[in-house]
Amino acid sequence: MFFFGWIVVGIISESFPFLNFSFLFFPLIPILWVSVPIFFAGKAFVYSSHHGASFFSAFINAIIGFFHYPKFLWSRRLTLNLPSNDIQTILKESVNITKVSAPDSLFCPFCKIEIPQALRFLSGENITTTKRPMLCPRCGLRFDCCRYCQNYEVSGNQRWMFENSRGKCKVIKELQSIDAFCDPSIAKRLHDMGWDSLYTGLSIPDSFTPPDRCRQFMLDEEKAKIDHIPGMGKIRVLLMKLQNKLNQPSL
């Protein structure tokens, strides 16, 4: 708004040179520049104080709101002691960010459809699927595959940076021939040293097909983003906690 006022003053000054408003308006620019973030910082402080935050936490939230108000809205605010009405409002507003109607839904980037109630908490802040296999009902894309799992380690000898079709599991381990997972030059050196096999992570030749004994899928949203599956990161965890709180029956 103050930029608009600056432009208006400039036009008036050019049209009517005998009128000089600059000495009145220009000193206000720094004040107006700072007043907007101060306003948001005040909102963050008051909101935090009214929802269970200590003075120190509310002050930290005010600082965050001063420099980046959206970070307060979609990070710090979600950790406050929020009533049901606020949680419902936040979950409705989150659609603009998450692109799905609920934080526990998945979105198929190929069919452009939402798979509801697809995710749940596994332990702590780790997220897994509500069933296995978790497939897109239209195209059959499998979401609970190694490709999107935290326990999957991409093979280091692939040419392309974002190619993750082969790798190994960091949880399931077995005795394997070094020729199966080592480069020929490294395998030769190990053979010369007397090593023919090593106990290491299970080789995954196709990241879309998890091994039958896999029981520990944990969603890795950074890996999922490679295939344009919308990722929310920490926001999804916080929103799912609010969703679970809202769905819990009142005592």
Image (spheres, helix red, strand yellow):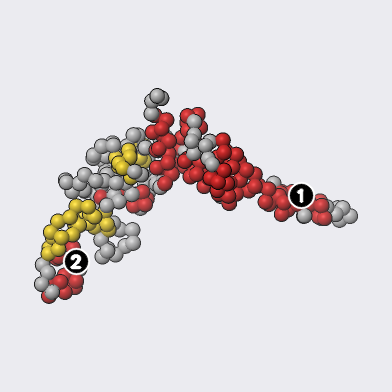
Mark nearer the N terminus (2 vs 1): 1
Q: What residue lies at 38% left-to-right and 28% top-to-bottom?
A: 248
In this orientation, does residue 113 appear? no
Q: Nearest to the eye among marks 2 and 1: give it.
A: 2
Report the residue marked by disc 2.
182
Report the residue marked by disc 1.
8
Q: Amino acid at mark 1?
A: Val
Element at label 2:
loop
Q: With 191 as the anchor, is 58 left or right in this view?
A: right
Front in this rendered view, residue 65 or 211: 65
Q: What residue lies at 25% left-to-right and 50% top-to-bottom?
A: 146
Q: Are marks 2 and 1 in contact (CB under 8 Å)?
A: no
Is residue 141 positioned above or below 197 on the image? above
Q: With 174 as the anchor, is 131 left or right in this view?
A: right
Q: Amino acid at mark 2?
A: Cys
Front in this rendered view, residue 187 or 86: 86
